[in-house]
């Protein structure tokens, strides 16, 4: 997904020079400001979009988006082959995340959004018993499958159901690990069987380290408001149903009845989001007389002061946004206190994840569980979870009518590594493919003679921040950097959440801080020496 691809729908490339509304080329001159965004993933693109949307970039200003990679999009890329589409990063975003819906509306992506198919409704937990007759344990309410599978005793299940009547002192808001929160509300046994898989499926593990306020803030909100997670969840479900029954206001189709529900993606995959953001940024820059430039395949090396402004590798800027996790790249700050703060952020604990896609065709009568996918239990050694892409988004696999006679297409997306086996992320692609196929065979997701016609391996060694006590202690380093370098702003998925919607929300916060900074310094800078 190169810069050239992003400009296909524009009348003329704006990578080197922008055009005003009458089609006249213009270049920055005296009094123009220079905005530089380091990081061309969804965080950086969202900041660029917000700056243009809110009018913080004006005629004559320069906007530069720079990235070490030769293409934009960050983790939101995909592999396509033979009708199969494997996401390298997020599989989708929940429709309940307002920041995501808002960006879809602002970038014209609402019409292209698709929700997960009804066949993806069921969720499963993988049984830790290797020789269990059924390794997939259905978790859909009322979750009694845990008792049937002997993963919880009747007494432990009753303890979990008594959650609304549990009154125990709780620590300061969010300052409690996910495991401890579940153990306090539902019992230790339930925490082992539910909190750990939940953290594994989203955060690649770390239930005993990640604060619940960072992992699932809504659970903390429910307990705070209603004194019970179950009561809060039921109230939220009822409110959601009432909201869905109401007609949407005519001013917004993004929250209307036609917008899909559940997990949202696009027919062309999640990379449609950064592509849509890039297109909107380029189009608005052209319309508003802002000089826009891509600087891809150009890693930033040094940030220093140039007078009262930050400079990247000797080039001054009025506003500099660092939109990538500190531990994913090398960057030197020519200021001792700032460099120390940056090193603290670089040492934030994080998990690596390997994504393996296995696709092909299985007999139509081969019995496999239908649903969203399965989470791995605490006893798992390396496997984090399995997603059934063919059930979730049928458009991401070949059309069944084109499948060989008597077969149907399947695509499993396996997540490996995390805190279960950190070294696994660095394994060779062949090793990861073999491991993924062995897991599918052991889980009876494919027949014994299955040979994948599609396979892909993507490793992310620095994928997901572990937002626990260490994170809370080092987080103030972000404020230190922004105060030491006026005009510098930090954003990214390491601040408050690892999901796409979290990145969009953090980008909005960064845009608000930039707006306040510009209000305090209304005068234009000088682009150049």
Image (spheres, rainbow, N blue to C red):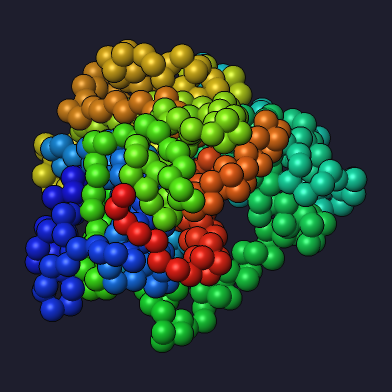
Q: Toward which corner of the image does residue 302 lie, by quadrant?
A: top left
Q: Horizontal and vertical percent for residue 10?
A: 13, 64
Q: In the rendering, at what x and y percent does residue 331 appear?
A: 43, 31
| Rendered view: 445 above or below 26 | above
Q: Residue at x 74, y 30 (%)?
A: 189
The N terminus, quarter of image: top left
Q: Residue at x 84, y 43 (%)?
A: 171
Q: For this rendering, which residue is in front, 440 or 489? A: 489
Q: Residue furthest bottom?
A: 250
Where on the picture, by quarter, is residue 404?
A: top left
Residue 133 falls left or right of residue 154: left
Q: Is residue 56 above or below residue 466?
A: below
Residue 196 on image: x %, y % = 63, 32
Can residue 143 be seen here? The reply is: no
The vertical placement of 237 against 455, above or below, is below
Q: How many marks?
A: 0
Residue at 63% x, 71% y: name it: 239
Residue 333 percent location from the top left of the image: 48, 33
Q: In front: 288, or 167?
A: 288
Which residue is depicted at the point 73% across and 46% down? 174
Q: Dividing the picture into quarters, in which one does residue 336 lie?
A: top right
Q: Is residue 151 visible?
A: yes
């Amino acid at each position: 997904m190169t810069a050239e691809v992003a400009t296909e729908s524009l009348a003329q490339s704006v990578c080197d020079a922008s055009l005003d509304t009458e089609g006249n080329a213009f270049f920055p001159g005296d009094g123009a400001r220079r905005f530089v965004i380091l990081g061309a993933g969804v965080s950086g693109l969202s900041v660029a979009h917000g700056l243009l949307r809110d009018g913080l970039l004006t005629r004559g200003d320069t906007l530069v988006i720079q990235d070490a990679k030769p293409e934009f999009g960050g983790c939101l890329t995909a592999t396509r082959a033979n009708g199969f589409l494997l996401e390298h990063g997020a599989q989708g975003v929940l429709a309940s995340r307002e920041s995501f819906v808002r960006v879809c509306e602002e970038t014209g992506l609402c019409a292209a959004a698709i929700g997960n198919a009804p066949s993806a409704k069921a969720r499963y937990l993988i049984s830790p018993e290797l020789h269990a007759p059924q390794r997939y344990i259905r978790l859909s309410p009322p979750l009694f499958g845990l008792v049937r599978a002997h993963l919880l005793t009747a007494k432990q299940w009753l303890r979990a159901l008594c959650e609304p009547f549990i009154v125990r002192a709780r620590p300061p808001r969010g300052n409690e690990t996910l495991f401890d929160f579940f153990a306090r509300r539902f019992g230790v046994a339930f925490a082992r069987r539910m909190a750990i898989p939940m953290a594994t499926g989203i955060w690649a593990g770390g239930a005993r380290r990640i604060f619940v306020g960072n992992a699932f803030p809504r659970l903390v909100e429910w307990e705070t408001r209603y004194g019970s997670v179950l009561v809060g969840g039921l109230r939220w479900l009822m409110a959601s149903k009432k909201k869905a029954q109401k007609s949407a206001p005519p001013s917004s189709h993004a929250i209307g009845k036609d917008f899909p529900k559940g997990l949202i993606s696009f027919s062309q995959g999640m990379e449609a989001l950064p592509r849509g953001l890039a297109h909107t940024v380029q189009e608005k820059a052209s319309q508003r007389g802002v000089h826009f430039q891509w600087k891809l395949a150009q890693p930033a090396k040094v940030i220093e002061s140039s007078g009262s402004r930050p400079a990247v590798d000797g080039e001054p800027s009025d506003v500099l946004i660092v939109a990538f996790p500190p531990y994913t790249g090398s960057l030197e700050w020519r200021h001792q206190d700032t460099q120390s703060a940056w090193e603290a952020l670089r040492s934030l604990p994080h998990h690596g994840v390997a994504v393996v896609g296995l696709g092909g065709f299985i007999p139509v009568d081969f019995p496999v569980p239908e649903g969203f996918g399965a989470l791995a239990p605490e006893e798992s050694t390396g496997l984090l979870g399995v997603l059934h892409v063919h059930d979730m988004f049928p458009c991401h696999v070949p059309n069944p009518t084109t499948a060989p006679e008597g077969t149907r297409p399947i695509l499993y997306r396996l997540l490996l590594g995390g805190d279960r086996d950190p070294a696994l992320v660095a394994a060779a692609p062949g090793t990861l493919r073999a491991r993924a196929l062995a897991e599918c065979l052991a889980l009876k997701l494919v027949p014994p003679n299955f040979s994948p016609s599609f396979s892909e391996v993507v490793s992310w060694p620095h994928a997901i921040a572990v937002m626990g006590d260490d994170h809370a202690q080092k987080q103030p380093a972000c404020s230190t950097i922004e105060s030491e370098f006026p005009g510098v702003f930090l954003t990214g998925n390491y601040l408050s959440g690892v999901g796409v919607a979290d990145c969009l929300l953090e980008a909005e916060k960064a845009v608000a801080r930039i707006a306040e900074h510009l209000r305090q310094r209304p005068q234009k800078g000088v682009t150049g020496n």
